Amino acid sequence: MSDKKEGAPFAKNILSLQVDLSKFSPASEEDKQSFEVMRPSSTFWRDGFKNFKKNKMAMTSVIVLALIIIAILVVPLFVPYKYSETIKVNGQRDRSVANLHPYKWSEKEQEFIDNGGKLFPHVMGTDQLGRDYLIRVIIGTRISLLVGFFASLIVLIIGLVYGSISGFLGGKVDLVMMRIVDIIYSLPDTLLIILLSFVLKETIGTQIQGTVLAKLGTGMISMFIVFGLLYWVSMARLIRGQILSIKENEYVLAATAMGASNSRMIRKHIHPNCISVIFISTALQIPSAIFTESFLSFLGLGVAVPMPSLGSLASDARQGLQTYPYKLIFPAIIISLIVLTLNLIGDGLRDAFDPKLRK
């Protein structure tokens, strides 16, 4: 039996490693609160969009762009006119309805209104063929935005994949891939669009009759093909340059030492650090595509008639610039708004998602 009494103080050998629990006390509530996490866990995208919302100019641009998108979707539901049809009064064509100023009526329309009839006003007037200009501007904005977003998506996907592979692998692979980019970069894009437009008109012009592609026309189809063949090289060069500098950082070396795959390192470690270049380049590619479409429409290689676009409307307005200047002002204002809002949104996304600029 032990001679120690129950409740006797703990006797510890001076050379023992056993801990004396009597020297410790439970943590207080204040001590526990000091170890609590100051904010809930978040993600890269959640933090980025939170910072983006703090940018007033960028958020205003988002609102303006959203209003434009809502307008091009909702307004055609309330406007009784069609973008391709001449305005008719009592089912009969009115030849005097051409080139009306905003909120003006032709003689037959005024007579119809005086007899108790009701007509939707020509908010932006009419064009030289007697078609309502408001609905043509709305549909033209819709077509131009679709062309811009679709073309930028093609450029983003091809350029991101190609530039990431070239920059990350480096060496001979990068050398060969960049020489291909140099060759493609030297090709004249405008000439290719014109040649493709005439070739496609002869080869698939009759085959696409009655389909959605026929409404776009061979000029727009050739433009999308050229965007997929040529316009991605600038995006690929930007992504390659960013990856060449980022992949030398320590966290990429640490991920490699931990056995991370190449695809995971690109997606999780490299792309987030060059996301600003991706965002700003994609945002700027949309107005660039709109300008390209406008240029092609000016040459008669854009959207097939009678479908309008902002470029074709501006080209048509050039003929009566001194007499009907408002026909150029309306599409020009919308193009300027779209370009300005997309630039501001791109800058806001760069400031919000670039790890080097985040606080």
Image: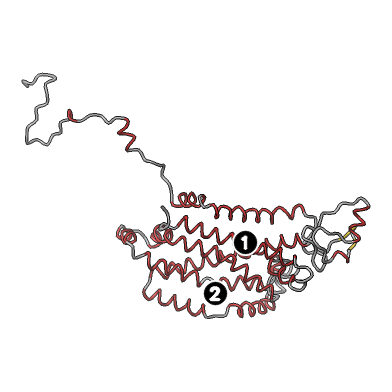
Give the numbered dot on residue 238.
none
Task: Label 1, secondary structure: give it.
Answer: helix
- Asked if the residue under mark 1 is in contact with the one under mark 2, i.e. CB atoms within 8 Å, the reply is no
Callout 2 crowding tier (Cα within 10 Å): few <14, some 14–19, many ≥20: many
> Given the image, on which type of amino acid does mark 1 rest?
Ile
Distance (Cα) linking label 2 and label 1 = 24 Å
Furthest residue in direction front, as rendered: 322
Q: Position of residue 77 (x, y in %)?
A: 75, 53
Name which residue lies at 61% across and 70% down: 224
Give the numbered dot on residue 338.
1
- Colour scheme used in the picture? secondary structure
Q: Does 143 sit left or right of 320 as displayed?
A: left
> Given the image, on which type of amino acid does mark 2 rest?
Leu
Task: Label 2, secondary structure: give it.
Answer: loop
First in residue order: circle 2 vs circle 1: 2
Q: Position of residue 64 (x, y in %)?
A: 62, 54
Q: Does 139 sit left or right of 349 as displayed?
A: right
Name which residue lies at 41% across and 42% down: 40
Name which residue lies at 33% across and 59% down: 251
Total count of labels: 2
Q: Position of residue 235 (x, y in %)?
A: 50, 69
Choose between 323 and 114: the one closer to the eye.
323
Splitting the image into 4 quarters, where does residue 26 fall? top left
Q: Position of residue 337 (x, y in %)?
A: 63, 61
Which numbered mark, 2 or 1, is in the foreground of this view?
Answer: 1
The N terminus, quarter of image: top left
Residue at mark 2: 230
